[in-house]
Image (cartoon, rainbow, N blue to C red):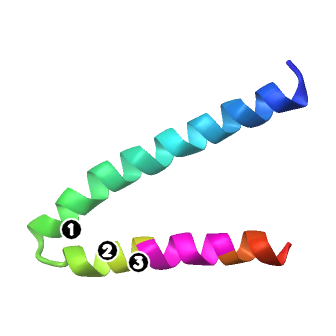
Amino acid sequence: MNNYGQGMLIAAVAGIMVFISVDELLPGAEKYGHHHYSISGFVAGMAVMAISLLIL
């Protein structure tokens, strides 16, 4: 396996992990009435990750 294939595999696994965590956490937050906080935190976390990638 070359570096490109390994990178694609890791990206796919990361995408699956993000989907599963959002799919499980958002309905749980909605059940307790705090889904706006969890969505705001999710968007803020994505923004922090994007900014950190731009800085590097």
Per the image, the residue denoted by label 2 is: 38
> Which residue, as the protein is rendered here, is positioned at the far front?
54
Position above or below: 29 against 14 = below
Q: How many angstroms separate mark 2 from mark 1 (CA)?
A: 7 Å
Dot placed on the residue nearer the N-terminal end, 2 or 1:
1
Are the residues flagged by discs 3 and 2 in contact, CB closer than 8 Å?
yes
Q: Residue at x 30, y 49 (%)?
A: 23
Position above or below: 2 against 15 = above
Are the residues flagged by discs 2 and 1 in contact, CB closer than 8 Å?
yes
Picture quadrant where residue 25 is located: bottom left
Per the image, the residue denoted by label 1 is: 29
Position above or below: 14 against 39 = above
Q: How many angstroms separate mark 3 from mark 2 (CA)?
A: 5 Å
Q: Which portion, as a residue range, is magenta?
A: 43-50
Q: How many angstroms separate mark 3 from mark 1 (CA)?
A: 12 Å
- Quadrant that contains the C terminus: bottom right
